[in-house]
Amino acid sequence: MRLFILSLLLLAEIIIESSILPFIKIKGVTPDLVLITIVSMGLIYGKKEGIILGLIGGIFSDILFGRILGIHGLPYMLIGYLVGFASEKVYKENRIIPYLFTLIATLSYQGILYLIIYLARIEIPMDIYIRKYTAFSLIINGIIVIFIYPFFLKLSEWNLIKQR
């Protein structure tokens, strides 16, 4: 039941990312709500939910945004697993932990995407990619996770999606 509810949350976020957030771009970059949710849920619930939600969020993103199935799924799934794996060793209620993990996840996600773009022989100079996309993604995602993570912690206390 928990994965179903969290999957619906991811679907709602992807709909928001595709319909509302394009009008709120900052320097051409929109917040990555799906990545923030995958990091948050991986921290709260662990690696199983992290990898599953990463795969689900990636497939939803690929259907709406990607031309190639898996371009978002692979990085999200990998990040969800790694954050979930690391969650066993951190204090989840600490406000700095989700911030740091979101920064690391954003860097990883952008790096994997750049590698995929490079392997697809799409010419984007790395310095421009880092300045234009990665830097602003770090700032935006870092700010948003500060406000969203406490909501996810509260959500995890509800009976339908409570931690075991």
Image: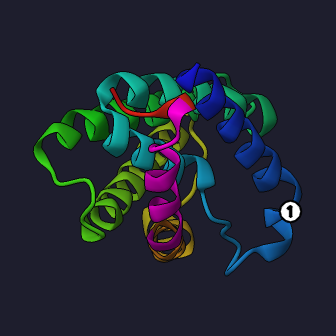
- Residue 135 is situated, as x and y percent measured from the top left of the image, at 46, 74
Q: Residue at the front extreme?
A: 159
Nearer-the-camera pick, 118 or 7: 7
Q: Residue at the bottom extreme?
A: 27
- Residue 44 is situated, as x and y percent measured from the top left of the image, at 35, 43
Horizontal side, residue 134 vs residue 89: left or right: right
Residue 119 seen in render: no
Vertically, is 35 above or below 28?
above
Nearer-the-camera pick, 122 or 67: 67
Numbered range of the magenta stretch: 146-159
Horizontal side, residue 111 vs residue 74: left or right: left
Residue 96 located within the stretch drawn in magenta: no
Q: Secondary structure at mark 1?
A: loop
Q: Residue at x 44, y 34 (%)?
A: 162
Q: Which residue is mark 1?
A: 20
Callout 1 environment at 10 Å: few (<14), some (14 to 19), or many (20+)?
A: few
Q: Quadrant of residue 61?
A: top right
Vertically, is 98 above or below 135?
above
Q: Can you say which quadrant of the picture contains the C terminus?
A: top left
Q: Amino acid at mark 1?
A: Ile
Scheme by which the image is coloured: rainbow
Q: Residue at x 17, y 54 (%)?
A: 91
